[in-house]
Image: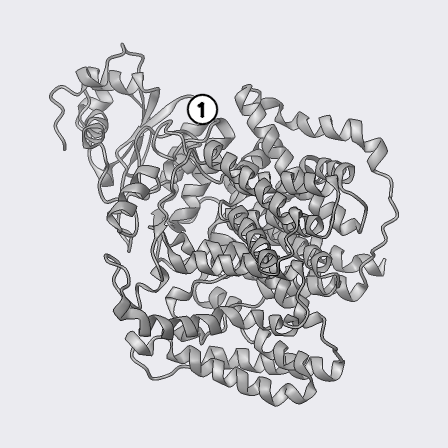
Amino acid sequence: MTAKLPWLALAAATVAIPVALGTSPLDVVRYVAYFVYAVVAPGTLVYRAIRPAPRSLLEDVTYGTVVGLLAETVALVTAGVLELRGWLWIWPLLVIVPLARRYTRNPGYPEKPSAAWSWAVAGVAIGFLAYLTAAFIAVNPPVPTGGAHQYMIDQLNLLAVSADLKHHFPLAVPEQGDRTLGYHWFAYGHVAASSMISGIDLPVVWFRLDLPVLAVLAVCLLAVTGGRVARHPWAGPVAAALMFTVGELVPQRQAPAFFGSITTYYSWSSRSLLFGAAVGMPLIAAVVSVLRGGGRRDWLLVLVFAAGTTGAKSTIVPLVGAGVAALCAVHLLRRGPRSTPWLLGALLAAVEVVAVAVLYGFEGQGLRWGPFAIMLDFVGSQRHGTTVRDVPLILWGLGAYGIAMGARLAGVVALLRRWSDTETFLAGTTVAGFVGTLCVWHVSWSEHFFIVAAWPCAAILSATGLVRLPWSPRALWPALGAAALLAALSVGLTLPVDPGGWRVPLPVYVLGGVVLSFAFLLRRLGLSAALAVVMFSGVARLPFDAATSANLGVAYHVRVTPDQVAAARFVRAHSDPAEYVATNVHRVSGGLMHGQSLVYWLSAYSERRVLLGSWGYSPESTGAQSRAHRLGPSPTYWNPARLALNDAAVLDPTPSRLGWLYSQRVRWIVVDRSAGTPTAALPQLTDEVWQRGDITVYRLRATSNCTPVSCSDNVQSR
């Protein structure tokens, strides 16, 4: 029973969070039942059937859960293609029934974690849950009830993606009718399947239930993978802490914005990052097993996890492939080439090519060459990038970037004399992540995703070096105490420097110098103590972010009112998923994002496709901004005639214009009078079925079809 206490405590914390925030206990029970029945159980059985040999129960359950998530994706696609969504709940039985009898027996695991190890992993996971709760979960109700709420724009867009996958396949661009979207959508397919099988309201799954479970899974996966790859059990908890507990080594009040982060903000703002990290960790373990001479089953696992990872996060497989390519290059330089890395690289390349064709439709996603583009608010210009004249300032900024991001990787120092193929692969993947972040430009700052995607390899590499050093309590506690003291210093440290040019990175250099001084003083306790001080001094980053910048403040938000959500949910309750919605809502009204075409509450909460709403996250917008080298969404719609026709049909309707809407599968019109007032013809030609405040819902009457050309006659832009 003592061995189970850490896991019981972790399970209790995971369940307590949504319940404490007002989630129905019945919904929590239903979600737990769904996750065990439809993800953990079938996935674990399949993993046991294909893995080479048993290692530990925790590995079987965590890796099996990843297999379950991928199998669920296959089932979701199959049900969508065959129009059998109502039968999706059946798919786990197709796995459980034939495999349960053979693969539910205890195989006699050779590895059993100690109580200390279990408490360490559970502690990291609970700490991560505390950060996510304070930074995101507790401050975002599933629906606004007591008044308007500021939702981060990305969250509603991604909720709309999940809503589309709940009712349609293939995925379409939110608010752009049935325009197909090439995207890493597996995380959002999982959210959709969660709602479909459990029967829980989609926003409750998104804002309350999915993220805590995914966070715990990611921590446990890294703990298992780290120990397996490093061949040392304590490398796992250390790696998990380096990714999910320790943040960047920066003065918290003067952290340069261009650094980005690994866990702060990104762990909750983009669900695909955490989902991709979870799916990618078994891929790392499988690749290392193959490099160490694994058999056919290891190769099969590489194929399964690589295929799944391409749809979980697009940046992961290219980075893993780069790590394998680095190993091939090292073998060539040593004149001792082996066939295994080359075959492995070919397999990963083939999987990536298929993914680019099938999942992404060869779309570039707005990425382009842009050396040091992350520094453009510090050096160079957003319009023209950096030049040779900027090199001194770039190098100055890179030094600070290395201190902030690289402090957690100090454990690599202990590996310099003991470098195997495994370390080469991990280092190659890590370097590729840094290179991608530093050399690529994206319209939405997504170049940071490269280093985030590579960080599990970086954390494992650094943890491997640290745990291989001799340790003693005499060295451990002073080192951790010094790290805590330095973390407190990072919160209070503020230098009187002007925010511009050469002065921007200066506070980071000062803090880095103080940390190195402490490490030098503790060197007499051993190299392990000195490295631990450097690696863990950034532990204040996540708590500080949660306390001062929960939900990213109001920097990238849209105000959503209870009336807006009520209107959307009325449409959901009274319509069929095949019925589209037309609206006059295209741009954010008020706040820092005023005028941007980034309003997704209608498609997110109605779970219906909008003919033409906001376009800021469409491939066309991304492509146009990328070509113009401009950040953010396109300020104009690329087909002004279609936009004018849509708005004329909504605000100044005629029978022919409404007929065009009807021919486009539109059956509902949602008007927000704060964005434009319709003429008296709208309630005369349609049925007004719901109204509250500025929001009115109209239902179209059956009418004769017409072509866009005939309906566009005499359309005047309002």
Q: Where's residue 442, x and y in %?
A: 35, 51
Identified at 74% across, 78% down, the residue is: 471
What residue is shown with label 1?
577
Q: Determine the image quadrant of residue 161.
A: top left
Identified at 34% across, 84% down, the residue is: 496
Q: Is residue 10 left or right of residue 372?
A: right
Q: Which amino acid type is marked by label 1?
A: Pro
Identified at 22% across, 28% down, the residue is: 642
Neighbour tally class for label 1: few under 14, some 14-19, many 20 plus, Cα within 10 Å: some
Q: In this view, does 280 lie to the left or right of 251?
A: right
- The one nearer the camera, 366 or 219, is 366
Q: How many labels does the image show?
A: 1
Q: Where's residue 63, x and y in %?
A: 70, 46
Asked if 84 appears above or below 197 in the picture, the reply is: above
Q: Where's residue 392, x and y in %?
A: 32, 74
User: Where is the C terminus found, in terms of image quarters?
Assistant: top left
Q: Determine the image quadrant of residue 684.
A: top left
Q: Where's residue 466, x and y in %?
A: 67, 72
Callout 1: helix, strand or loop? loop
Q: Is residue 449 left or right of residue 467?
A: left
Asked whether residue 31 appears in the rendered view, the answer is no
- The one nearer the camera, 542 or 700, is 542
User: Where is the N terminus found, in terms of image quarters?
Assistant: bottom right
Asked whether residue 650 appears in the rendered view, the answer is yes
Asked if 48 appears above or below 656 in the picture, the reply is: below
Identified at 44% across, 67% down, the residue is: 548
The outermost residue toward the front is 335
Q: Determine the image quadrant of residue 639.
A: top left
- The one nearer the camera, 703 or 533, is 533
Asked if 287 appears above or below 682 in the picture, the reply is: below
